[in-house]
Image (cartoon, coloured by chain):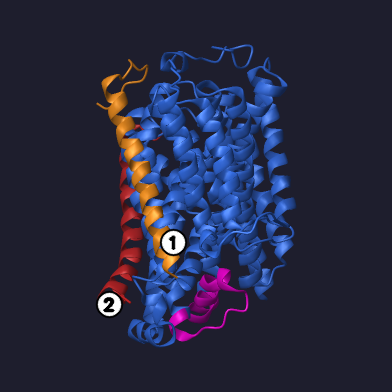
Chain colours: A blue, B red, C orange
Amino acid sequence: MSNQLLGIVVIAAFGVLWIAVGLSVARRVRSTDDYLVGGRNVGVALGSATILATWVTGNTILAAPESGYTFGVLGVLGYAVGGGVAVLAFAPLARRLRTLLPAGRTVGDFFRLRYDRKNYGLFLVMLIIWDLGWLLTQGMGAGIILESVFGIDFHVGLVVTVAIVTTYVTIGGMVSVLSTDFMQTMLIMAVVFLFPAWVYISANPVDVYQGMAGLAEAKLSLSAADGLLFLAVIPLIYTGEVFMDNTFWQRAFALRPNVITRTFTLAGIGWVFVPIATGTLAWVAVGTGLELPGGPSSVAPEVVAAYTGRVGAVIFLVLIWAALASTMSALLNAVSGIFMNDVYNNFVRPQAGDRELLRVGRLLTIVAAVITIVIAWPRPLTLLTLLILLGVINAAYIPPIVMGIFFRKTNPNGVFWGVVIGTVAGLLVFGDGAFDLLWLRLEVVDLPAWLGGELQGAVVSFLISTVATVGWTLLRPREFDFRSMIDWTRSENAGIAEGKK
Amino acid sequence: MITTPFWLWIALIALGTLGSLGTLVAITVTFLRERREGHLW
Amino acid sequence: MDAEYVWALLGLLCLALMFTMMALGVRAVRDEQPVSREEDEQ
């Protein structure tokens, strides 16, 4: 059987399985609430599995090795610590959310009730940009891996992957996602444990280490400036991602309240092992001088192909596929949640009833899927670069979210201008004086060399946002009554009731 | 330059592998317990 | 080259600020925790 045909068979088999499982539980969905937060009583096992499934992405399998290849040991540590810290740090926020928003469904609900209209609108725009960017990386990952392992055309891989995931997510929403996530997480963790063992046993660790020391000693460094910068800034970016993303907020709303801390802790710690396991695979490429025709993004599949042959390559593909599918499903459900709960139900049809919302939500899931395909089609930046670019936005939103959840007096104007100025400045620093977006580059200003850099962008955006939010709040505190948020409910027949303002 | 010593390097590799396995076991055990108690979702 | 070390320290500063904000926040609400509808930690 040719490689291509084998690949198609494998994808088709798992695709059918995920769709079957997803659809079989979909009948539990009776309301928009079920569709978005699955019953609000999820336990530790399903809860930690869905958090892991969401947060173990194609990037964790492909971009963590990329950073392990580019930055060596510090790259792996930075990635692992960054992602783990982000999930652990979210636990106290998640607990507080359940108290503040018992009827909450999305992060948008929080922004709408906590801040003013301009903040709400800006946040929705930024969130959608961020989530579409994240979806883009998953779509691209699908195309890349299917091409590199099976020689399936990038665009075919992209479209087929999105189509399969969209099928079960559209019908069953969060409920389908929870059940498929559990299976996918079990698969991911089992395979992730397998590969470093398999590869390093084949490749003799002592030889690899000595190879690294000889060919690329800098990558064994624990003191390299660029590696330390990565280690310091990635946790900031990843925490920003988690704090502002609807996938995490939905899961905070979905969990049974008394297991929230336990679940995020288990998921946070468990997650750390995954990029370490995949990242260390890249060191074999460094230590043996392995050629990477597909660039650093493909270091993991290239190493696997070289040392575990065809069987290994197929299993590895299944691992990446599961990671991509589970994240993509979470994102499609989360994005459709924002579209239907916030954009549609607030700006288009506030009077929409539950059945209408559910129908519209399903349609919007498909819209999100199509957008994903369209933007991934031209195959833009490398995965890691894109994450760091979006990290400028993520980092800027940390102060608004933390300050808004915990402090009564946070000034909405400080929040707004902090985000705007922080993001603009951060993007300019990221682009060395230019707006370096996916498809175009706009030179704006001449910046000195020390004031430019990709990771530096997120540092700048966070600092400006913090200074503006905290500073403005100290100078002009604005009282907010959390009771109004706690007491807010959705009216049964007329969509979202205007609880206040 | 501070170089990663071999023992730390190999410990990281082992940590990734064994930690993933440990997480798998922890979730499975929890799943079985919660299913028995009817607390899955 | 030197500039990157400075940025790395700034990055650590950002993390410290973030954790400080969160710690202060958790402490601030602990004192004025409103009655919640859901059962809290048992």
- For label 2, count other residues whose C-alpha is less than 10 Å away and answer few (under 14), some (14-19) or many (20+): few
Expressed as whole percent of the image width and height from the top left, the position of residue A233 reads 43, 55
Q: Which mark is residue B5?
A: 2
Front one among A204 and B7: B7
Q: Secondary structure at mark 1?
A: helix
Residue A489 is one of the magenta-drawn residues:
no
Task: Quadrant for residue A94, please give it.
Answer: top left
Q: Is residue A39 visible?
A: yes
Main SS, magenta region, reads: helix
Q: Position of residue C33 (x, y in %)?
A: 31, 20
In the picture, measured across the screen, residue A241 lies left or right of residue A152, that is left
Q: Which residues are magenta?
A: A286-311
For the residue pair A138 and C5, the one nearer the viewer reads as C5
Label 1 is found on which chain of the structure? A
Label 2 is placed on what type of residue?
Pro
| Residue at image mark 1 | A230
Q: Quadrant of the N terminus of chain A?
A: bottom right
